[in-house]
Amino acid sequence: MKHKIGYNRLGRKTAHRVAMTRNMLTSFFRYERIKTTKAKALAVRRKAEKMITRSRLDSVHNRRMIGRDIKDKAVLAKLFTDIGPRYLERPGGYTRILKLGPRPSDAAEMVILELVSDVEQPGKDKKKKKKSAAPAPAKKAEPAPPEEAEAKTEPEA
């Protein structure tokens, strides 16, 4: 039984797994899309989601916590200045996994891990679009109050 196992070891020693995850996270935030196996994508997505949530608030503490895993300063700056603020209104679910099918050599399931590009939440926007799509009934033109009507008819001196 696999009770209390919190992560996938991916068949690697600890140092190799940590280094691989850090490299994949750096590449993921640099290119905003990577092609990998399903097991690796699930492991990277778990950390990436937490990093994006932390990067929404730019503080010294948050930069240092994420800087433990992302050593490239340019990618770290991109995460806090571009990617984090992009998802301020989104409560989670910053990434998606698209299945590509099996790899020819060993039949490992290949996927694309990418950032969600549309920031709007699709479920909530459909309801608003349906309501706003219906044309509002036209109102009859009401006559202007007498003071405004007189002001319009008087010539300027």
Image (cartoon, rainbow, N blue to C red):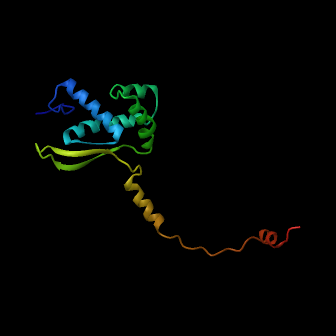
Q: Which residue is painted at 17% across and 25% down in the image?
A: 13
Q: Which residue is painted at 32% across and 27% down in the image?
A: 69
| Horizontal side of residue 41 vs 147, given as left or right | left
Vertical order, 25 against 64 (above or below): below
Evaluate whether residue 47 shows in this view.
no
Q: Which residue is painted at 86% across and 68% down in the image?
A: 156
Q: Where is residue 110 in the image (x, y as percent from the top left)?
A: 19, 45
| Horizontal side of residue 7 vs 135, given as left or right | left
Vertical order, 30 against 129 (above or below): above
**Direction bottom: furthest residue:** 140
Q: Position of residue 143 (x, y in %)?
A: 71, 74
* Res. 52 image quadrant: top left
* Res. 127 image quadrant: bottom left
Vertical order, 126 against 144 (above or below): above
Q: Where is residue 87 in the image (x, y as percent from the top left)?
A: 42, 43
| Horizontal side of residue 55 vs 151, given as left or right | left
* Res. 46 image quadrant: top left
Query: In front: 17, or 91?
Result: 17
